[in-house]
Image (cartoon, grey):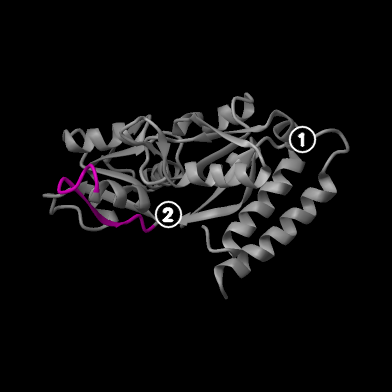
Amino acid sequence: MKIWSVIGAIVSIAVGLATMAAPAAADKLDDIISAGTVKCGVMLDVPPVGMRDNDNKPIGYDVEFCQDMAKALGVEAEIVETPAPDRIPAILSGRVDVGVASATNSLERAKAVAFSIPYQIWDVGVAVTADNSEITTYQDVKGKKVGTVRGTTAEVAFLEDLKKWGDNTSHISYGSNAEQFLALSQGNVDAIIESTAIFGEYATGQGKGTIKVCCSMTTAPADWTGLMVKRSDQGLLNWVNLFVWHHWKNGRT
């Protein structure tokens, strides 16, 4: 079955439920249209999904996704830089309208915010320095120093594995991917865990010749990432789900 057929089935259910739950009062969607701007929370330290160019202008996949969404709404896109640990707080505080920040739609996170249907799917991998020959499989990180980014699902999955292993594996949590890459390059950790899309971009760009993706994190499921809005913004969620569906259907995602 084609992936967009699966997504189509999901969005049909999601939109139906959102429609039944939608309140009669004005929704955030109306506020966005009236203001003429949609504020998107985007991580700008994770190429290729979000970064800054030489002119300090936000670019990347999530930036473009927000811009496409704004165009469909007939409003301007405002990119609000939002580090990984701040993605949910930015939604809850109202600092951003929509989180376009490659957030895995986990059940735990869904207790705090509402997720759209998935707009991208990633694998989770392990990266090491280019000259590392000791770590070739995920199991090889046992007994090593491992770095993750705070609040990510990759970190949550790794911490669960640490509980099961019960060995002397060390874990260091970082506030951003930039900090994580720096720690690896300086030898503060032996391996780092994150999306293979992020690793791939870094390994062929800024970190070319210095790191490599050695293997997949075999215990972590594929990351189905969704857009985030407040749980009370059902009308906005309904629209966002339809927008994501059209992106899938038109081959834009």
**Res 220 label:** 2
Query: What whole-number distance in Å separates the C-alpha atoms at marks 1 and 2?
Result: 38 Å
Residue at coordinates 24% horizontally, 46% vertically from top-left? 205
- Give the left or right position of residue 38, taking residue 221 as reference: right
In the rendered image, residue 225 lying in the magenta stretch gets the answer: no
Residue at the far bottom in the pictured view? 1
* Callout count: 2
Q: Residues within 10 Å of mark 1 (few under 14, many from 20)?
A: few
Q: Residue at x 63, y 28 (%)?
A: 92
Q: Position of residue 24 (x, y in %)?
A: 88, 38
* SS at circle 1: helix
Q: Position of residue 134 (x, y in %)?
A: 14, 52
- Quadrant where the N terminus sits is bottom right
Label 1 sits on what residue type? Answer: Asp
Is residue 222 left or right of 56 when viewed as pictured? right
Residue 47, how many percent across, how many down?
Answer: 35, 43
Give x and y (percent) for residue 236: 72, 41
In the rendered view, tell whether residue 245 sits above or below residue 108.
below
Magenta segment range? Answer: 205-218
Pointer 2 local density, CA inside 10 Å: few below 14, some 14–19, many at least 20: some
Q: Which mark is residue 92?
A: none
Q: In front: mark 1 or mark 2? A: 1
Residue 216 colored in magenta in the image: yes
- The amino acid marked with disc number 2 is Ala
Query: Please, what secondary structure does the residue beneath circle 2 have?
Result: loop
Residue assigned mark 1: 30
Residue 162 in view: yes
